[in-house]
Image (cartoon, grey):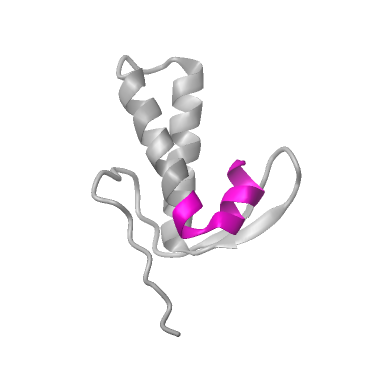
Amino acid sequence: MKEKKQELPKWFNGMTYDEGGIVENRFTGQSIELNNIELSMYDFVMGATMTSEMGWSTANNEIVRDLRKGLSWFRQNNAEAYMVLLD
């Protein structure tokens, strides 16, 4: 079976990393390895979460929309990582 190549969506405006890494859930201590595409989206989601929670942006509705899109992307592209890191 051929593995589907992951791509970041057109709306993604974060940094795209060249390498992946191991990420740990700050609440549970569980960790999982992410490829470069997944790590790029994970950092985008975490940055959007922090920005929306701090109220630093006047464009908060847009950030929340992109945050939801990022979470949805994770559920579709790596459900296991979503459950470990973001659920």
Q: Left of 20 or right of it: where is 7? A: left
Magenta stretch secondary structure, dominant: helix
Residue at left offset 56%, top offset 61%: 21
Q: Which residues are magenta?
A: 75-87
Residue at left offset 45%, top offset 55%: 76
Please, which residue is most extreme toward the left here? 10
- Where residue 82 appears, x then y in whole percent? 57, 50
Residue at left offset 40%, top offset 58%: 17
- Quarter containing the C terminus: top right
Q: Nearer the viewer, residue 22 or 6?
A: 6
Q: Left of 27 or right of it: where is 41? A: left
Q: Is residue 87 above or below residue 56?
A: below
- Where residue 16 appears, x then y in whole percent? 35, 54
Q: Is residue 39 above or below residue 20?
A: above
Q: Is residue 31 above or below residue 61?
A: below
- Where residue 49 appears, x then y in whole percent? 49, 30
Q: Left of 11 or right of it: where is 37? A: right
- Where residue 15 appears, x then y in whole percent? 35, 48
Image-quadrant location for residue 26? top right
Looking at the rendered structure, the number of numbered marks drawn on it comes to 0
Residue 79 on the magenta span: yes
